[in-house]
Image (cartoon, rainbow, N blue to C red):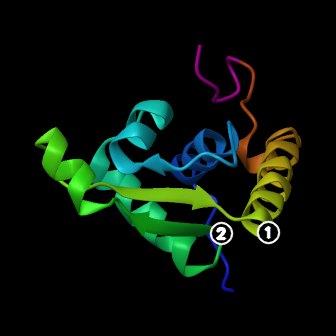
Amino acid sequence: MGTLRMTLQTQLVLRALLEDPAKERYGLELCELAGLPSGTIYPILARLEQVGWLDSTWEDPAVHEEAGRPRRRFYRITEDGAEQARLALAHTYRARKQPLPGWAATRPVGEGGTP
């Protein structure tokens, strides 16, 4: 397993997957849940699968042919992936709660700060 950059978009995808960890979800469903476009979702899903946090399977061809639509790829967060995702999300949440470093703090108006 490798490391994963915890971008805001990755966090949104992980939260969507953790809503029901046992449920398989397809890409466009995750787009709706996370509020992100497919061009953002699919690279994140590929990275999550590469580090071992997700498993994916293709839909049975008979199902999509009968429905008259393209074949779907389903993603499910692994047990270890769910645990790692919860830890990573908790860590990013705690990191955001830390005070801003001195260089990032806003200055009062009149001392170079914005009104």
Residues 36 and 100: in front is 36
- Classify residue 87 by image quadrant: bottom right
Amino acid on which disc 2 is placed? Trp
Q: Position of residue 45 (x, y in %)?
A: 47, 62
Q: Could you tell me which quadrant the N terminus lies in?
A: bottom right
Residue at x-position 18% and y-position 40%? 67
10 Å crowding of disc 1: few (<14), some (14-19), many (20+): few
Q: Position of residue 74 (x, y in %)?
A: 43, 56
Residues 67 and 106: in front is 67
Residue 80 is marked as 1
Q: Position of residue 15 (x, y in %)?
A: 65, 41
Residue 39 is marked as none
Q: Position of residue 76 (x, y in %)?
A: 58, 57
The kind of secondary structure the magenta stretch mainly shows is: loop
Q: Earlier in the sequence, mark 1 or mark 2?
A: 2
Amino acid on which disc 1 is placed? Asp
- Classify residue 32 by image quadrant: top left
Cβ atoms under marks 1 and 2 closer than 8 Å:
yes
Residue bearing the label numbered 2: 53
Horizontal arrangement in the rendering, residue 47 relative to residue 54 (left or right)? left
Q: Could you tell me which quadrant the C terminus lies in?
A: top right
Q: Which residues are magenta?
A: 109-115
Helix, strand or loop under label 1: helix
Q: Is residue 114 magenta?
A: yes
Residue at x-position 56% and y-position 69%? 55
Total tally of numbered discs in the picture: 2
- Real-space Cα separation, disc 1 to disc 2, in angstroms: 7 Å
Residue at the limit of the structure toward the bottom, as seen here = 1
Q: Is residue 56 magenta?
A: no
In the rendered image, is residue 101 in sight? no
10 Å crowding of disc 2: few (<14), some (14-19), many (20+): many
